[in-house]
Image (cartoon, rainbow, N blue to C red):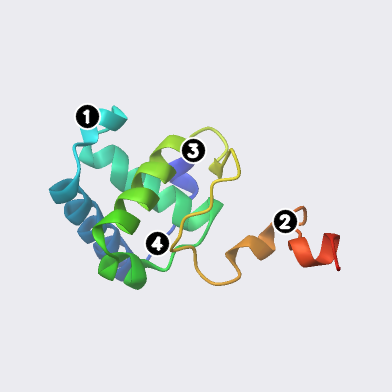
Amino acid sequence: MIIDKCKVSHEDNAKVIKIMLRAASLMNFEILDASRLDIVMDLTVCHCLACPLNLDGLLKANGGDLIHDVSGIVRHLNRDTGKLEDCFVPRFARENAHARDPWNVATDDVFPY
């Protein structure tokens, strides 16, 4: 399983669980065909392998941003590779998280006019 490749601190794990609980109070996970455990695993895999998250920011996020990120991660995370697909980037991605992707080029670099 891809989750086996993830190592998170106890502090980060506690934050992920708090994020899941807050998201559970705002949305119905059945719409995503996901359980609370699925959400915790998807957030953990995303944070470790796909896109480091600003967990503190996500904990404090307004409801709309929190739902956007959690549902987007669940919908776009490839559970076989541990990568986010369909160009999805969470709003609370840690700063410079996209720097891991050599194909992610700023628009200004492509069209400098």
**Position of residue 88 measured from the top left corner of the image (x, y, whole percent):** 54, 46
Q: CA distance from mark 1 to mark 3?
A: 16 Å
State the residue position of label 4: 8
The extreme left residue here reads: 25
- Residue count near mark 3 (Cα–Cα under 10 Å), binned few <14, some 14–19, many ≥20: some
Dot 2 or dot 1: first in sequence order is 1
Name the one closer to the observer, 90 or 110. 110
Amino acid under label 3?
A: His
Q: CA distance from mark 3 to mark 4?
A: 21 Å
**Position of residue 80 measured from the top left corner of the image (x, y, whole percent):** 53, 32
Residue at 27% in and 66% down: 59
Residue at 40% in and 62% down: 8
Q: Secondary structure at mark 3?
A: helix
Q: CA distance from mark 4 to mark 2?
A: 26 Å
Q: CA distance from mark 2 to mark 1?
A: 33 Å
Residue 1 in view = no
The image quarter containing residue 10 is: bottom left
Q: Choose mark 4 or mark 2, whichever is in front.
A: 2
State yes or no: discs 1 and 3 in contact (Cβ < 8 Å): no
- Relative to 106, does residue 68 appear above or below in the rendering? above
Residue 110 in view = yes
**Position of residue 63 measured from the top left corner of the image (x, y, whole percent):** 24, 57
State the residue position of label 1: 30
Residue at 58% in and 39% down: 85
Query: Would residue 27 appear left or right of 46 to someone viewing this image?
Result: left
State yes or no: discs 1 and 4 in contact (Cβ < 8 Å): no
State the residue position of label 3: 76
Amino acid under label 1?
A: Glu
Q: Quadrant of the C terminus?
A: bottom right
Dot 1 or dot 4: first in sequence order is 4
Dot 2 or dot 3: first in sequence order is 3
